[in-house]
Amino acid sequence: MLIRDVEDGFEVFMLQRTHSAAFAGGMYVFPGGKVDATDSAEALEPFCDGLNDFEASAILQIPNGGLAYWVAAIRECFEEAGVLLARDTKTNQIVAFDDAATQDRFDSARRSVHDSSLNMIELCQSESLQLVTGSIHYVSHWITPVGEARRFDTRFFVADAPESQEPLHDSQETIASLWVKPQTALDKLERGELAMFPPTSENLKFLASYGTTAEVLAAAKKVSNPVAILPRLRTNSDGKVIGVIMPNDPEY
């Protein structure tokens, strides 16, 4: 979840998945995807600021390989939204796409990372970058209900969007994008104007309870060991799935 302050609050960046997607077609989501083998390369750890694999794994409560989730979040934000959460070691500032040549160079890198002809280690080496993993905070954990044909074990993270980069959907996996206040997105969901799954809307509710990005990030830092949320499928008398039951619902 990439967030940014605006005059009267803050907004979160959302993408609409292509209608032809095998999963979540047409749904509004946050940038994301699966952890790839290259995300867990040990050689990446020296290119990560403020977080090592031992610390990341402890946060996720897994034996090892936790840092790969943060790397995957950064890589997917770059691939899907064109946002690179990385520090330029020459300026010690978040990398800025502030001129046409730089924008073109990183747009080319974005496509190369997407088609796997360039990995994050190579990108960090060629551009003198450090991934700002320590500035990305883990806030929730969702697992797809038993019985679904496609199941996912998903971690949600939140980060401040860089001021000098403007997110944009990739026009391949995603076909539209918008900056929206969390409560506005929830209102649009209620009116049927935006389609989204419960994990997305529930994370929007988390965001909507705060007034600024600083408040969100401060709260996110305090999140400790979020319980994995496993909704259940709601069926009718014929066994047809008609919805989901959340853990706080009476019939769960």
Image (spheres, helix red, strand yellow):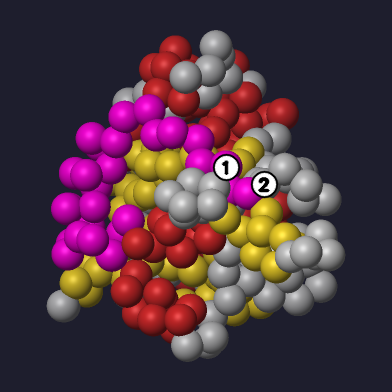
Q: Nearer the viewer, residue 141 or 218?
A: 141
| Label 2 secondary element | loop
The image position of residue 246, as x and y in percent, is: 51, 52
The image position of residue 26, as x and y in percent, is: 68, 75
Residue 85 is tagged as: none
**Do we see residue 238 in this rendering?**
yes
The range drawn in magenta is 206-232
The image position of residue 2, as x and y in percent, is: 40, 58
Q: Residue at x 17, y 64 (%)?
A: 211
Do labels 1 and 2 touch, CB within 8 Å? yes
Q: Nearer the viewer, residue 158 or 172?
A: 158
Say which quarter of the image contains residue 4. bottom left
Q: Residue at x 53, y 60 (%)?
A: 198
Task: Name the N-terminal-most of marks 1 and 2.
Answer: 2
Q: Which residue is mark 1?
A: 230
Amino acid at pointer 1: Leu
The image position of residue 130, as x and y in percent, is: 42, 34
**Do we see residue 113 in this rendering?**
no
- From the viewer's perspective, is 31 left or right of 129? right
Say which quarter of the image contains residue 181. bottom left
Query: In the picture shown, does residue 187 fall above or below 65?
Result: below
Residue 145 is tagged as: 2
Residue 230 located within the stretch drawn in magenta:
yes
- CA neighbours of label 2 inside 10 A, class few (<14), some (14 to 19), many (20+): some
The CA distance from mark 1 to mark 2 is: 6 Å
| Label 1 secondary element | loop
